[in-house]
Amino acid sequence: MADTDMSDVQESDCEDIHCPPGRDYDTFMQETAGIRQLYEAGVPFFTKEQLQDLSRQLKQAENSDKPEILIKGLEGTEETFEVKTGVTRAGSEPGTEWVLKAPAIEYRTFGFLTSYRAYQMDGYSDLSLRVLHYMELRDEVTKELLPGFRYAVDSIDIIKNSFTSCIQTWEASESYAQLQEIVESRENFPPITKIVALALGSMQPRSLNNWDHRSEFQHALALTLRDIVGKRQGETSGNVQCYVQDPAYTEVDKSILKTYNITILEDPDAFVEIDASTIVLTFAPDVPVRQIVADIARPAMMIWNTCEEERWMHNGREQFMYDYLPYQLRVFSS
């Protein structure tokens, strides 16, 4: 479990920053003034160089006796995070324990860093990136994950057959036909070399009663989009690579995706791949994908779902996604 909500439109991104004055409000405004100035000046809160350095440190930490991650803040501060993968804590029920999973990245947007609510909880910070650990609850003796933290289906064959069925259903749908028509009929179609899909989720269900197959259909979209784009580009079709990234992927997911020649990347490596010849896919992610992309690249296209609240996009750098990207392709937005 994460200590912080990291949704694509974070609660703090959508809140009115003119909060009712509180005891620390004047201090909050003074301490976060520099963050606001950096944002207004166009200073990126996320860069490829920053993400590449964090990726390097995370990989090094896997083989280190004393794994630590150093992250620099926007205003020059530095903070060191100790990697504690496998460390246990007392469980919430007798006979249980929490176990820390592999480190994950917390992406902190302008909206989060200038949120009075977040300031009241955690104090001032200029770190747009942090490292945290998700936790799972398990039996203290057997080490078996408790219901709700383990997957209901472990069979690769069952998941693969379900995924195949979802691909067939998707390809027979009206939405697929619309996507195909858009890509094949659009003039001045930009050259595409990559499809990068972010946070599509695990195809393994946590519960058979709540198996909605959403992740499978989203992966089916990525697959078929690669084929449609490749067909349009003719002789360059073999050059369209498909990358996916989600810390939630299991070994079952990875095994199945590899059979479809999909490359699985670890966070944050997929962000680094995004460039002007990329189509980016993301649907209700639990990281602020669009804010990150707005800082690091101008992809050829993005496909996303419209959020209930998008005020944050109309007054900041992310406005390019409405000014620039709709000319290319923006479907499935509602």
Image: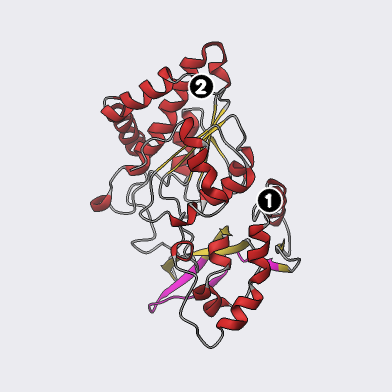
| Tag 1 near tag 2, CB within 8 Å | no
Q: Amino acid at mark 1?
A: Lys
Query: Residue 158: percent from the left, percent from the top?
Result: 32, 38
**Residue 193 in view of the camera:** yes
Q: Mark 1 or mark 2: name the one nearer the start of the chain.
A: 1
Of 246 and 151, which appears nearest the observer? 246
Dot 1 surroundings within 10 Å: few (below 14), some, or many (20 or more)?
A: few
Image point (50%, 36%), residue name: 325
Tell me, for residue 195, which label it has, or none.
Answer: none
Query: Residue 155: percent from the left, percent from the top?
Result: 36, 41
Which image quarter holds the C terminus?
Answer: top left
Q: Which residue is the site of mark 1?
A: 59
Extent of the magenta region: 80-99
Image point (28%, 46%), residue name: 212
- Marks 1 and 2 sit apart, C-alpha to C-alpha, by 37 Å
Query: Residue 89: percent from the left, percent from the top?
Result: 51, 75
Q: Amino acid at mark 2?
A: Phe
Q: Is residue 271 above or below residue 229?
A: below
Residue at the extreme bottom of the image, as rendered: 23
In the rendered structure, the answer to whether residue 223 lies left or right of residue 62 reads: left
Image point (54%, 49%), residue name: 318
Q: Is residue 313 above or below residue 129?
A: above
Q: Is residue 284 magenta?
A: no
Query: Residue 235: percent from the left, percent from the top?
Result: 55, 11
Q: Is residue 38 above or below residue 123?
A: above
Tell me, for residue 189, which label it has, or none.
Answer: 2
